[in-house]
Image (tube, rainbow, N blue to C red):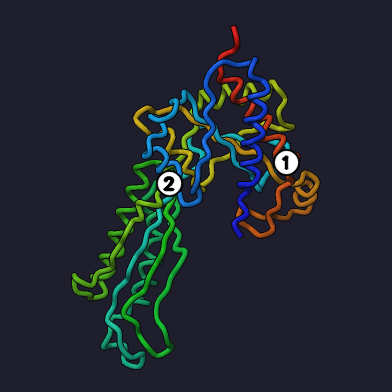
């Protein structure tokens, strides 16, 4: 189950558009609403920009977005100045081997053992090659190899998700994955033409989201003054990805700000916290936003954010 709250997002999107049209006499400027597809694959914003979004339509002075939060009660707003979401890379590794019978392993080059060694060594990238002060994640999310108990296969497939904030840390991780995989193949005695193949899926790359601190301060101050939420609080960055970042990474370097709106029923939130429990995360089949309060908070917060950035009528 996907369960990420995109129905909440689109409801707030429509509600904000309606409110700003109703309040047309209170602002001057051009409002551009982006109905973007394919956020979860990290490709929608990139494709829209490649299709001429900033040339075919008015180029904005600011970009704003919101996302529901499965860890906060409905009626609240969370924000993060600076890096808020991570670079997200998908990496495929094909680990080759020389197959044979499981009873005669000395006649083979076992790709399952080699894949296991690569997985273990990849953990040193974060623990020993990246500064402890720089967030980084290397997760092997999928491993497939072999078909039968007594057969040593000739191939194992690994799928990784790799996350960082800065371009420098991203390069360290991606370069390190290739170095470790290939050289472990050499250690295992594989010929050069059978070394592990590492492919970075550039079509699924999502760059880190950077919230412009000045814009964050301006918008959150307006939200507080307007009383759009019971709580408006700074929250830590996360290692999730969001292709909203693409809109601020063109040569125009347009300032952007994505904020969080709490989505958990407030009573359920309080009961869970009091009991020392944990809440279902985004994408969990048990995540069920409290729709009315979440949507109303999203509409209020985004409307006030837009009004703050538009010029006032003369």
CA gap, disc 2 to disc 1? 28 Å
Residue at numbered disc 2: 206
Q: Which mark is residue 137?
A: none
- Packing grade of label 1 (10 A; few <14, some 14-19, many >=20) is many
Q: Compared with residue 78, is residue 169 higher up or lower down, i.e. above or below?
A: below
The answer, for residue 16, to whether it is visible in the render is: yes
Q: Nearer the viewer, residue 131 or 208?
A: 208
Residue at numbered disc 1: 74
- Packing grade of label 2 (10 A; few <14, some 14-19, many >=20) is many
Q: Does 89 sit left or right of 285 as displayed?
A: left
Which quadrant: the C terminus? Answer: top right
Q: Does 32 sit left or right of 246 as displayed?
A: right
Q: Nearer the viewer, residue 51 or 230?
A: 51
For residue 154, which quarter of the picture? bottom left
**Percent coordinates x, y for residue 77 in the rendering:** 66, 35
Q: Does 27 sit left or right of 76 as displayed?
A: left
Q: Compared with residue 241, is residue 195 higher up or lower down, i.e. above or below?
A: below
Instruction: Please name the residue shown 63% across and 22% down the image.
Output: 221
Which quadrant: the N terminus? Answer: bottom right
Instruction: Please name the residue shown 33% across and 49% down the image.
Output: 172
Considering the numbered disc 2 on the image, is that residue within a helix, a strand or a loop? Answer: loop
Q: Are marks 2 and 1 in contact (CB under 8 Å)?
A: no
View extreme (top): residue: 314
For residue 76, which quarter of the picture? top right
């Amino acid at each position: 189950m996907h369960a990420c709250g995109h129905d909440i997002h689109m409801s707030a999107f429509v509600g904000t558009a309606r409110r700003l049209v109703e309040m047309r006499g209170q602002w001057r400027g051009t409002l551009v609403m982006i109905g973007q597809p394919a956020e979860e694959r990290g490709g929608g914003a990139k494709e829209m920009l490649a299709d001429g979004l900033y040339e075919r339509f008015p180029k904005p002075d600011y970009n704003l977005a919101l996302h529901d939060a499965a860890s906060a009660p409905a009626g609240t707003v969370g924000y993060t100045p600076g890096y808020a979401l991570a670079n997200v890379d998908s990496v495929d590794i094909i680990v080759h081997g020389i197959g044979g019978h499981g009873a005669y392993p000395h006649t083979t080059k076992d790709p399952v053992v080699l894949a296991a060694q690569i997985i273990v060594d990849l953990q040193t990238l974060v623990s020993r090659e990246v500064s402890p002060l720089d967030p980084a994640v290397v997760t092997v999310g999928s491993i497939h190899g072999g078909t039968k108990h007594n057969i040593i296969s000739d191939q194992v497939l690994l799928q990784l998700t790799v996350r960082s904030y800065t371009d420098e840390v991203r390069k360290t991780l991606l370069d390190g994955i290739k170095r470790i995989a290939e050289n472990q193949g050499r250690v295992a005695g594989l010929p050069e033409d059978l070394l592990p193949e590492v492919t970075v899926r550039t079509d699924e790359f999502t760059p880190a989201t950077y919230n412009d601190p000045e814009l964050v301060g301006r918008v959150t101050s307006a939200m507080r003054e307007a009383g759009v939420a019971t709580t408006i609080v700074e929250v830590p960055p996360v290692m999730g990805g969001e292709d909203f970042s693409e809109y601020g990474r063109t040569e125009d370097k347009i300032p952007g700000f994505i904020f969080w709106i709490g989505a958990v029923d407030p009573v359920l939130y309080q009961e869970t916290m009091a009991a020392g429990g944990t809440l279902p995360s985004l994408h969990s089949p048990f995540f069920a936003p409290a729709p009315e309060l979440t949507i109303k908070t999203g509409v209020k917060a985004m409307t006030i954010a837009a009004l703050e950035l538009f010029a006032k009528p003369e």
